[in-house]
Image (tube, helix red, strand yellow):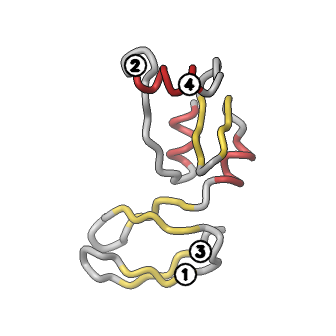
Amino acid sequence: MAKEFLSQNRIHFEEKDIDLDAGARNELAKRNISGVPAFFIGKEVVVGLDKEKILRLANHRLVECDQCKTRLRVPVDKGVLKVTCPKCKNLFQWDPK
């Protein structure tokens, strides 16, 4: 459910499976976090799928260039933006709303 929510909202994420990744498991233990999913967003930690808080803390979305389909990370707190694709140089407008 968490991956689907992040994908639907075009939020870039790095998935770590604590059953397979000892480093990830140790990171949660070190921070005294016993629940999953856990989200590290900047300096904040969100335990559980608190959608409103995640959307508030995530300051970017992934958008796709219309021409070459390259995925770009674009800030949401800057209003309507003119974005230039670094791969094909396509210029397009993006509105975070």
Q: Which residue is mark 2?
A: 22
Q: Is 68 rendered above or below residue 7? A: below
Q: Which image quadrant for residue 79?
A: bottom right
> Residue 95 versus residue 58: which sits nearer the camera?
58
Q: Nearer the viewer, mark 3 or mark 4?
A: 4
| Separation of marks 3 and 1 at Cα, in angstroms | 6 Å
Q: Is 51 rendered above or below residue 76? A: above
| Separation of marks 2 and 3 at Cα, in angstroms | 40 Å
Q: Which residue is mark 3?
A: 95
Q: Amino acid under label 1?
A: Leu
Whichever of labels 1 and 4 marks the residue nearer the N terminus, that label is 4
SS for dot 1: strand
SS for dot 2: helix
| Separation of marks 3 and 4 at Cα, in angstroms | 35 Å
Q: Amino acid under label 3?
A: Asp
SS for dot 4: helix
Q: Which image quadrant for residue 56?
A: bottom right
Q: Residue at x 36, y 71 (%)?
A: 66
What x and y, as percent, mark residue 11? 52, 51
